[in-house]
Image: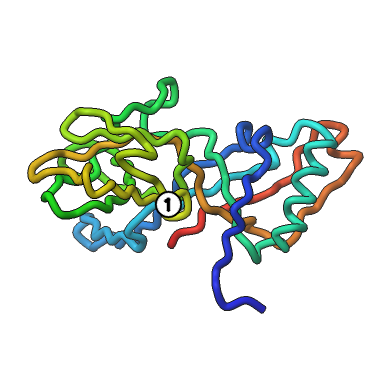
């Protein structure tokens, strides 16, 4: 029995994740009034992503790799890192991340720690998504439009998505801090059983392997 959420810092098989299907889900409650108008209430403040990795399995070897990964995570018990095939970077999917991709905050001359976020949509209602599992070597940071050097001017934590500037590189008042990055998503299996019919699999029938994003 476990009373805490454990995320193993291991990556779900990349070849399978690139062919997975899925995307974001939100929970909205809608009540239709007698007048025909609607009252809408967001049950979740943030979206939550769901995927089916079964669609990414193309061979028995890949299926075996996923099954071994499932057993090691003890089914739904422990989380892992997942590379979302549709949304894994600060830039457009066709572009490499750049240091000006995402605005993080404005410097005040004192604050040295900033959290990575990704903004979706523009005015009037952009949504800011916290990024907790950046790929450290992909992170690029700029202050007032000037790129800084990772390992000298700043460090990045791959376990919580925080950028820490060196004392000498602390962003001055009014300077906008921006960043570009690639990232993983904390996830878990969304079932404690994977059912496979080998005859059906060899005939092209895909097993269902549901995954769900872990929200802090």
Is 100 located above or below residue 119 in the figure?
A: above
Residue at 55% x, 73% y is 4
Task: Indicate the position of residue 211 as horizontal and vertical percent values.
Answer: 60, 51
Residue 22 location in percent, x, y? 54, 41
Q: In which quarter of the image is residue 150?
A: top left
Q: Nearer the viewer, residue 103 or 28?
A: 103
**Label 1 crowd (10 A; few <14 / some 14-19 / many >=20):** many
The total number of labels drawn is: 1
Left or right, 137 with reference to 52? left
Question: At x 66% / y 42%, what residue is drawn?
Answer: 53
Locate the C terminus by quadrant.
Answer: bottom left
Label 1 secondary element: loop
Q: Which residue is drawn at 89% across and 42% down?
A: 198
- Image colouring: rainbow
Q: Residue 76 occupies which quadrant of the picture?
A: bottom right
Whether residue 164 is visible here, answered yes or no, is yes
Give the labeled residue for mark 1. Answer: 132
Q: Tell me where residue 54 sits by quadrant.
A: top right
Which residue is found at the position 27% from the left and 58% from the top?
A: 40
User: Would you place residue 59 above or below residue 29 in this image?
Assistant: above
Left or right: residue 216 versus residue 165 is right
Q: Is residue 118 left or right of residue 88?
A: left
From this viewpoint, is residue 87 visible?
A: no
Position of residue 24 measured from the top left corner of the image (x, y, whole percent)? 45, 45
Q: Which residue lies furthest to the top in this view?
A: 94
In the rendered image, which quarter contains the N terminus?
bottom right
Residue closest to the eye, 103 or 121: 103
Position of residue 164 in the picture relative to residue 17 (left or right): left
Farthest-out residue, left:
174
């Amino acid at each position: 029995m476990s009373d805490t959420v454990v995320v193993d810092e291991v990556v779900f098989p990349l070849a399978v994740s690139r062919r997975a299907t899925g995307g974001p889900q939100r929970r909205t409650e809608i009540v239709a009034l007698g007048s025909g108008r609607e009252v809408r209430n967001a049950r979740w403040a943030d979206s939550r992503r769901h995927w089916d990795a079964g669609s990414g399995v193309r061979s028995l070897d890949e299926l075996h790799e996923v099954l071994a990964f499932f057993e090691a995570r003890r089914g739904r018990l422990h989380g892992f890192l997942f590379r979302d095939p549709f949304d894994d970077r600060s830039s457009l999917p066709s572009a490499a991340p750049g240091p000006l991709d995402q605005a993080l905050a404005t410097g005040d001359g004192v604050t040295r720690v900033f959290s990575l976020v990704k903004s979706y949509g523009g005015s009037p209602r952009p949504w800011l998504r916290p990024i907790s599992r950046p790929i450290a070597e992909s992170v690029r940071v700029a202050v007032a439009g000037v790129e800084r050097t990772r390992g000298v001017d700043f460090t990045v934590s791959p376990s919580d998505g925080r950028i820490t500037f060196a004392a000498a590189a602390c962003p001055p008042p009014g300077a906008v801090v921006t960043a570009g990055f690639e990232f993983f998503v904390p996830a878990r299996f969304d079932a404690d059983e994977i059912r496979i019919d080998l005859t059906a699999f060899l005939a092209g029938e895909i097993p269902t392997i549901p995954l769900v994003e872990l929200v802090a």
